[in-house]
Image (cartoon, helix red, strand yellow):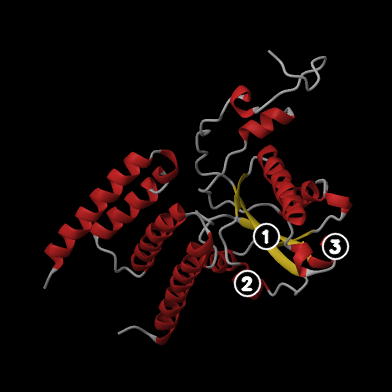
Amino acid sequence: MQTLDVIKKRRSVRSFTDKAVEENKLEKLVEAAIWAPSGGNRQPWNVVIVQPKEDIEQIRAVSPGILGNPGALIVLCADRIKAGGNEEAAGSGIAIMDIAIAAQNICLEATELGLGSCMVGSFNPKAVIELLDIPDRFIPELVVSLGYPQNIPDAPPRRTVKETVIRWIKLGKGNAKQD
Amino acid sequence: MQSKIEEKKLSYELLKQFCYVITSARGCIDEPKSYGVSRLLGSVERLVALLDNQGLADNFLKEKGAEIATNKYLARQDKEKFIEFLDKLVIDFTRQLKRARY
């Protein structure tokens, strides 16, 4: 698929079949994540992958934003050390943006592979750390739920390019006042 | 009478519900206000599913659980229809409460 087609085809899928997500596909998703850009090329992300049903159920219990019954979860964590050496840096806007970009790469690759995905920010990070025994240096920032789609929702309306651009300073016009 | 294993399983399933409700309560402090509505409905949906798995959900609860599962996304798509659905749900449960009184 062309890049823009994949971008437009991606939906937030919240309803999945019972079919398990293959390990080789999960590996490809992580590969997509690690090719995301990051501030200063710090690559502040690490992931925890969860596949067993009951483990996913436990994460769901502390993650109200995970809907449906996903076949796998990828928990994207900020690495305090890679992000800049302290807790503030791990939680800084740049590390979070890097992780969000990596998550988008995962969702786009999932679309390409015929998987449904949904980015989830509504979870309790401390509870997730506790359940998954995540070492102190990592902070869960986003969860991507994955599985084979049961239903693919319709695309919600989008604003047009014209409605989105606040101002477009075109070639040859400079920043001078335009008529 | 339930066996010890069944009691343990029920207790575990209930713990998951409590985790969901408590986590949702914590989330309500920083998350968008509209999420709270979804979490409350999610709690009912999960509780009905739990009762159903235990063979304790009657037809009314099964039907309403299915309605919640179908209509919960209206919150994002059509606010007026979502409010209409919630208003009807309130009345349906209230009428069932009147009927179920013993």
Q: Which mark is residue A141?
A: 1
* Precedes in sequence: disc 1 or disc 2: 2
The answer to whether the residues at label 2 and label 3 have Cβ atoms under 8 Å apart is no
Label 1 CA crowd tier, 10 Å (few <14, some 14–19, many 20+): many
Instruction: Give the letter of the chain under mark 2.
Output: A
The label shown at residue A126 is: 2
Q: Position of residue A10 (x, y in %)?
A: 62, 37
**Marked residue chain, label 1:** A
Secondary structure beneath label 2: helix
Report how far apart the C-alphas of labels 1 and 2 lie in the structure: 11 Å
Q: Is residue B83 left or right of residue A91?
A: left
Residue visible at 58% across and 39% down in the picture: A11
Q: Nearer the viewer, residue A147 or A139?
A: A139
Marks 1 and 3, the one that precedes in the sequence:
3
The residue nearer to you, when weighing B72 against A16, is B72
Q: Amino acid at mark 1?
A: Glu
Q: Amino acid at mark 2?
A: Lys
Q: Which residue is mark 3?
A: A82
Three-letter code, disc 3? Lys
Residue B6 position (above or below residue A36): below
Element type at mark 1: strand
Label 1 with label 3: CB-CB less than 8 Å: no
| Up/down of A88 relative to A136, above or below | above
Q: Nearer the viewer, residue B8 or A36?
A: A36
